[in-house]
Structure formats: structure tokens, C-alpha cells
Image: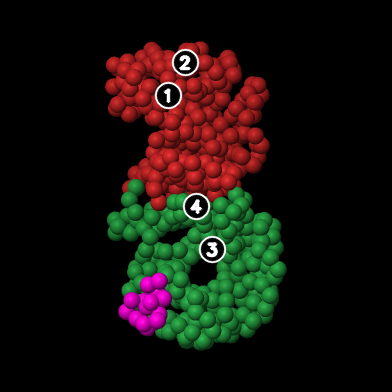
Chain colours: A green, B red
Amino acid sequence: MIIVGEKINSTRKSIAQALEKRDAEFIATVVREQAQAGAHYIDVNAGTYMDKEEVDYLCWLVEVVQETVDLPLCLDSPNPKALSEAIKRHKGKPMINSISLEKDRFPSLLPVITSQPCKVVALCMAQTSMPRTVDERVSVGSELIRKLTDAGIPIGDIYVDPLVQPVAVDKGMGLAALGAVQKIMNDFPGVNTICGLSNISFGLPNRHLLNRNFLALAMGYGLSAAILDPTDTKIMATLLAVEMLLGRDQYCRNFIKAYKQGRIAGS
Amino acid sequence: MIIVGEKINSTRKSIAQALEKRDAEFIATVVREQAQAGAHYIDVNAGTYMDKEEVDYLCWLVEVVQETVDLPLCLDSPNPKALSEAIKRHKGKPMINSISLEKDRFPSLLPVITSQPCKVVALCMAQTSMPRTVDERVSVGSELIRKLTDAGIPIGDIYVDPLVQPVAVDKGMGLAALGAVQKIMNDFPGVNTICGLSNISFGLPNRHLLNRNFLALAMGYGLSAAILDPTDTKIMATLLAVEMLLGRDQYCRNFIKAYKQGRIAGS
């Protein structure tokens, strides 16, 4: 299971403050915590800033993060300019989050993601509307996979995001995302699936509980990566438990090690 | 999701003491707690006693439980004599736990479970050996379904138990049970699946965490009933969250109601 650490996001007040003060040490601390907790990628998002400000912050974050840890970044922006500048400064192979079928987004981002080797999140968002059903998600996801592989991107570098919507809005939204994960993983061997979790619980109480149970279900349906807070010991407990229950933890080693190191929440 | 409350079991010291003292009030309290927490069936198991003692305790439990709550029982014994006596005293349609393909067990229990309408747990235990793979479980489960339906038991009254074994013994044991649940639910429309959860975590730390994540996964694979402790607010939080995430909770009513009533554990 690939873990993308979500904490470097300018929607969080402490991160916005650190960006505005160029407080590299604060950013480095949050990055280190996520790396130690098991992150494989560090997501960086400065999307609350516009135009040149977003570009500058994203580029600065790439440098600060890569001076801090030896991990690739997940460059999280719909802005081709911000991505193309950030990608140039990135050492190694970043993940780009995300391309979609929305108007102008695919043609404007394709040159960026083919400019150098990178992994790419393909969001199941259609040109004209939000998908509702499993089939709509699979249809958009399939088209994105075809277009990206046609452009030379290896299928193993594609991470399809089924687009998670709140169950409080429509009770079928959980199964719509889960079913899409399952079908895409079955239909396209070698492809990956990824999602954020928190949209599922929007508008409901006990959101962390819902997010981590949705993670468990999604892993059971085949999800191969998730954007989450790896310093949340409850969600990491779920992730490591489910990895083990699904037979991916030889001799239960990872789970027992995390338990002994206090990296997962108690019973 | 059908919930079978597991707490009236003579392996628990307080229950054994209550049986030996014929302390009906203690039993009634444990039964009431489970009913209020959402149990649909009350499991009764006096399996630590032999022969006539088990028969007497099981019959006494049927009377005490049915004087306390208006719920059916899950009569939990491999002993045909205990089951046939208990079933006679049971008002309404009990669940019998369990029949299997083990030597002598099927022919000795069949007359009991066909003596009056009841639901029956069909344990995927073969005549000669414990099943290991999905296919072995499905093979035994399918044969049990065929034999039981041939004997006139409606398919909707059959609850196939895939037989959960510890992942600490073999990392594939989680997927073996989950895959069997999925295939049996697909192959036999209308049939139910059921399991206990705690075997999965045998020998590991943080067992409650593992048990409730296994419940989440199993529900995702199609499990329709579980034997558990409904007074455990963490496992009930998982159950209600997953029901909602799988689209079975219109307007999120059950989840929000349970949250407001404090019936589920916090975030």
C-alpha cells in the first residue's frame, strides 16, 4: 500500500503561516514526522494561493522537502504552470496530482507530465459533469488510462482516483467509488488506484472513524494507494491491520513491529 | 446485517458462575444489554459442560432468555441431544449453530434441524480435514447448501460459516475466509453467510482492532451476519459505519441515531 502523506497543504492554517514566513524548519518537521510514520510520498499543495504565488510556494516546498527527506513528492495542483516549474526542481520521479478529462485540463497538463518520467493521478472527473455511478467512473478512468498510455506513460505509473463523494449526499457514493476501484483494477492489470478519504464523511459526525473504515473497505476492493495523514495512529492501525488481514504481511512482521514501536493506536 | 450476541457463553467465567448458581437475574442483565445494543439473536453456549449438564443448562438458558427479551436464540452446540431438547422449549424460530460435514455430525443433526422451522449455521468443516483455501471452503459450503436444501430447508434460512482461522498461523487465512464469503454469496443467491471474528486475531496483539477491521472487510465481501459482542461500542461503530458506507443506511439515519444515543465509540 502506497501512502501519500497529506499534511503539507496550505488549507491548513499552520502550513499557510509557515509558507508566508518561509519557515523551512516548520515544514521540515511536518515532513519528517510523516516520513517516520511511513509515508512513501510527501504531498505538497499550495492551492489556496493564486498564479505566481502558488508557483513560488510549490517550488519552495519541493526544495525544502527534498532537503529534509529522501522521498519523492506528490505535486498537488491543477495549475500547469505551477506543476511545470515544480517538476523541474524535483529530483527523481514525482507523482503529479492530478490530470482529468475536464475541459482544457488534459491537453494543458499532458506536455507537463510527459516532459520527464513521473507518476500521475488520473481523476475520474469528466469533461462536463461529476460522475455518479460506477460505470461513469469506469468510463472516465478507462479513457484516461487509454489516453495516458497512448502518450507513452507506463500503466504502472498511472494512479486512477475514482473521485470519492460524500455518503451524506447520496448513500450510494461509497459503493460507487469502491465498485470503480474494483473494476478498474480488474480491467487494467498493472494500473494503480488511489484516493483521498475525507470526502466520504463530509457532513457526518465521527469523521475519522468513517474515513478509516472506508480505507479498510477500499483496500478490500483493491485500492493500492491512499492520500492520508500517516501520523494518525488510528488510520495507520487500520492500514497495517488490513494489509495483514489481506495476506500481505509475511509472518505479521510489519504489524507486530509497528505495534511494538507504538506506531499504531491501541485496541 | 444480522447481529448474533455472543456473550452468553460458559467459557466466560461470569456466565459459568451464573449457570452454576442458576442466577437468572445475572443472565437476564447480560441478555438485556445485548438486546438494547442491537442484537437480533442471543447466542447461548454451555459447551464447557458435558452430556446431561449441557442439556440442562442450555434448556434453562432458553427459558431465562425468552422470559427476558422478545428475541430468538442462537442455540450453539454440536450436541444433538442438547439441541433437540433446547429447540423444543424455544418459542419461535431459533438459529442452530452449527451443522457441518464432519463424521456423524450431519446425519445426527439433520433430524433435529428439520423437526421444526429453524435457521441453521452451516460450518465449512469437511468430513476429514480443516479447509485451507477458498475452493475447499466453497466446496464444503456448496455441499452443505445442497444437502440442506434437499432436506427442505429454505436457502434463506442457511447461514454458511466459512470457518475463520488465524492469520498468525497462515497469512492467507483472512483472504481464504473472505473469498469464500464472496463466492458463496455470488453462487447461491438468497443464502446468508456468518462468522465469528475473534479466531482471525488469535496469537496477535491488538485483537479487538483486528477483529473489527476483519468485520469491515468481511462486510465488504458480502457477509450478512456476524457473531459478536454488540455491547462493544467500537465494533458496533465499525458495523454501523460500514453499513452506511456500503449504501445500506438511508439518509445515514441509523448511524446518526446511534451516534446521538452514544451507542458507538468516539472518533
Q: From this viewpoint, which residue is outermost toward the front?
A: B260
Disc 3: CA contacts within 10 A as few (<14), some (14-19) or many (>=20): many
- Nearest the eye: A241 or B63: B63
Same chain shared by disc 1 and disc 4: no
Q: Residue at x 60, y 27 (%)?
A: B157
At label 4, the amino acid type is: Leu
x, y (%) of residue B19? Answer: 33, 19
Dot 1 and dot 2 residues touching (CB under 8 Å): yes
Q: Nearer the viewer, mark 4 or mark 3?
A: 4
What SS does tag 1 mark?
A: strand
- Reading the image, the residue beneath label 2 is B86
- Reading the image, the residue beneath label 1 is B44
Q: Nearer the viewer, mark 2 or mark 3?
A: 3
At label 3, the amino acid type is: Cys
- Nearest the eye: A252 or A93: A93
Same chain shared by disc 2 and disc 4: no
Disc 1: CA contacts within 10 A as few (<14), some (14-19) or many (>=20): many
- Would you identify the image quadrant in which residue B45 lies? top left
What SS does tag 2 mark?
A: helix
Q: Residue at x 40, y 63 (%)?
A: A230
Specify start and end residues of the magenta stretch as a single range. A13-27
- Reading the image, the residue beneath label 3 is A195
